[in-house]
Amino acid sequence: MLKSKNQIETNKWELEVEVSPEAFEEAVQKVYLKQKSKISIPGFRPGKAPRKMIETQYGEGVFYEDAVNSIYQQTIEEAVKEAELTLVTAPEVEVTEVGREAGVKFKATCITKPEIKLGDVKGIKVTKTVNAVTDEMVEHEIGHMLERGSRKIDVDDRPAQNGDTVVIDFEGFKDGKAFEGGKAEKYSLELGSGSFIPGFEDQVVGHSINDEFEINVTFPEDYQAKELAGAPVVFKIKLHEISYNELPELDDDFVKDTTDFETVEELRADVRKRLEEHAEEHAQADVESAILDEVISKVEGEIPEVMYEERVNEMVEDFAHRLSHQGIDMNTYLQFTGMTEDSLRTTYREQAEKQVKLRLALEQYVKDNSVEVSDEELEEEYKKIADQYQMPVESVKQYIAADSLKFDAAVQKAVDEIKAAAVIENA
């Protein structure tokens, strides 16, 4: 039972919780009955030794730890509920006293959901900027189409030049010794792409098929492999192939063969239209992001650091899960990129803070404005999820509690209301 409740900091409470001697004795007896078959006492058959004999042999507290563990979770949950606290993370719990006469006493340190104030978010003013589509942008997009229709032309009558693709063997040496990861055979490299460290591709330019040569380069100071960072090295190269992509001519025949249009001008008009639609979509996304950033700026209150940290944890775990689907584990990714777990977490920190503040702001909006979701709207939400995962609605209801989904739907309603009330000015 809850003995006392004391606020020690903003959003931080300390609960004193007690389990009566009688309740603790009941828990100890249950542990004894569960474990006695595994305990051997001279003179007794397995499972027949009296509890008092076992306690005499192994100490009075032989069952205490398991008994405390068996009642800990429910006891703390009931105390938190009695204290009417909404926690944002699991409490830190310390056993302060345990014994036959005293029962069990806990001290639970709880971090609670913050109470915030939300300023006026109705009528937020934002500027919408739709970037103009230029002729250069249209031609650039058409250029990609030409590249997709290009054909490979092998070269054997001239040296390699920027823009060519070469096939090479290479091996790197530092202080005369080959270093790990510096060797490959029949490697395809586009010269001028910047794929390799500075200076490498430039020194391949000018060489012909079957040439064997050396190039000298220096690794960047911030290179991820520390043993190579800033180090001068020599690569031994053998050049096997040179080729380039020949682009088709942009004419009506090309358009007819590769698109649903008849002329170049029709194609250009369609490309422009699509680019303008994308520009409009991008501008709208920027507007919505600006509105929500303004909502975040209206949040007043002290937010527990643990809320940010736990959101970062979730984001890192989600990223690791996505990596696993690509067959990459987190340690391999960190090694390949030269990052540490701390630097990875730092990349997510700002985004995590914004997400936490936005969620708190929207929840407060729901409360301040009595945003409600009808039973019909709730059923529609269940149906959307069922359709998304191709599951029966009733199965979805088994996994997602109605109260939880209804609240999430109310939060989305808050977003929609705030966006609808915003004042959008065109740049």
Image: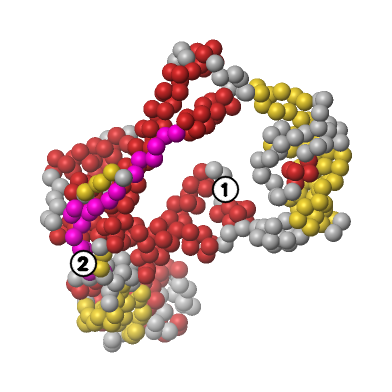
Cα separation between marks 2 and 1: 43 Å
Q: Residues within 10 Å of mark 2 (few under 14, many from 20)?
A: some
The residue depicted at 79 percent of the width and 58 percent of the height is: 232
Label 2, on which residue? Answer: 117
**Looking at the rendered structure, which numbered label has been put on residue 328?**
1
- Nearest to the observer: residue 65 or residue 322: 322
Q: Vertically, is 344 above or below 72?
A: above
Q: Secondary structure at mark 2?
A: strand
> On the picture, is 424 further left or further right than 152?
left
Asked whether the residues under the numbered discs 2 and 1 touch, taking CB atoms below 8 Å apart as contact, a structural biologist would say no
Q: Vertically, is 58 above or below 217?
A: below
Q: Quadrant of the C terminus?
A: top left
Q: Looking at the picture, how far across and down is residue 343, in whole percent?
A: 53, 62
The stretch of residues the image draws in magenta is 114-134
Give the quadrant of residue 54.
bottom left
Q: Earlier in the sequence, mark 2 or mark 1?
A: 2
**Residue 334 in view in this figure:** yes
> On the picture, is 155 further left or further right than 277?
right
The residue depicted at 37 percent of the width and 68 percent of the height is: 306
Q: Residues within 10 Å of mark 1 (few under 14, many from 20)?
A: few
> On the picture, is 168 further left or further right than 360?
right
Amino acid under disc 2: Lys
* In the image, residue 155 lies in the stretch drawn in magenta: no
Q: Secondary structure at mark 1?
A: loop
Q: Looking at the picture, how far across and down is residue 48, in whole percent?
A: 40, 71
Give the quadrant of residue 358.
bottom left
The residue depicted at 44 percent of the width and 75 percent of the height is: 44
- Nearest to the observer: residue 362 or residue 205: 205
